Amino acid sequence: MAEAASQNESVLALAIPEAEPLVATYRLEYDPSAPVGIPAHVTVLYPFLPPEQVNDEVLSLLAALFAAQPSFRIGFEGTARFPGVLYLEPQPAAPIVALTELVAAAYPEYPPYGGIYPAVTPHLTIAQVDDDALLQQLDLEIMRTAGDLPPIFSDVREVTLYEERDKRWSATHTFPLTG
């Protein structure tokens, strides 16, 4: 009898708690990943292995890959959009792209976003809706709110593995970066 394909997923991401005061309310309403357990984050690699395939060998390889990478500081100064998506744009993006390329090279069967995009654009999703007028309204609200808050900076010191089981996500492992 053939084994059923996994319905569960995993993602490697950079948690950005410093962004929560600005984006949490919007994400809970407009980002489907927020109500199921994923905090404000920038994706490193999605989709990644099904959770049942994440074993000690995978964890050791990820730990070694990330331990060889320097920690870094990113800032979020503005919003940008993809079709149907409003996001905060991390600067600089290069260290995040480097992490994505590193893991994708180690796991070529899991290209970023399933290989559907020609390039990786690091981003912190605020809203996913197919309504341009609503995205414009949310963008204006976010920028107004951001003006009342200190700038968002994050010292990225680790990559987190989030696993989905039974339609809920949780952080299962963290992998420190160097420095």
Image (tube, rainbow, N blue to C red):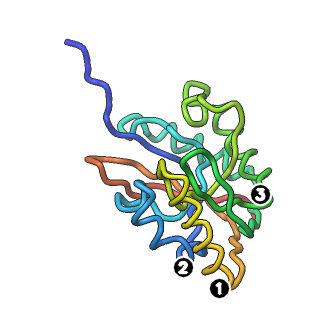
Dots 1 and 2: beta carbons under 8 Å? Answer: yes
Tell whether 65 sits left or right of 22.
right
Tell whether 151 sits left or right of 44.
right
How many angstroms separate mark 2 from mark 3 (CA)? 27 Å
Residue holding disc 1: 149
**Front-lying residue, 52 or 84:** 84
Label 1 SS: loop
Dots 3 and 1: beta carbons under 8 Å? Answer: no
What kind of residue is marked 2?
Answer: Pro
Residue 79 is situated, as x and y percent measured from the top left of the image, at 68, 63
Residue 148 is situated, as x and y percent measured from the top left of the image, at 65, 87
Give the crowd class for mark 1: few <14, some 14-19, many >=20 residues within 10 Å. Answer: few
- Extreme residue in the front direction: 133
Quadrant in the picture for the C terminus? bottom right
Tell whether 36 sits left or right of 55.
left
Label 2 SS: helix
Q: Residue at x 36, y 48 (%)?
A: 164
Q: Residue at x 61, y 26 (%)?
A: 108
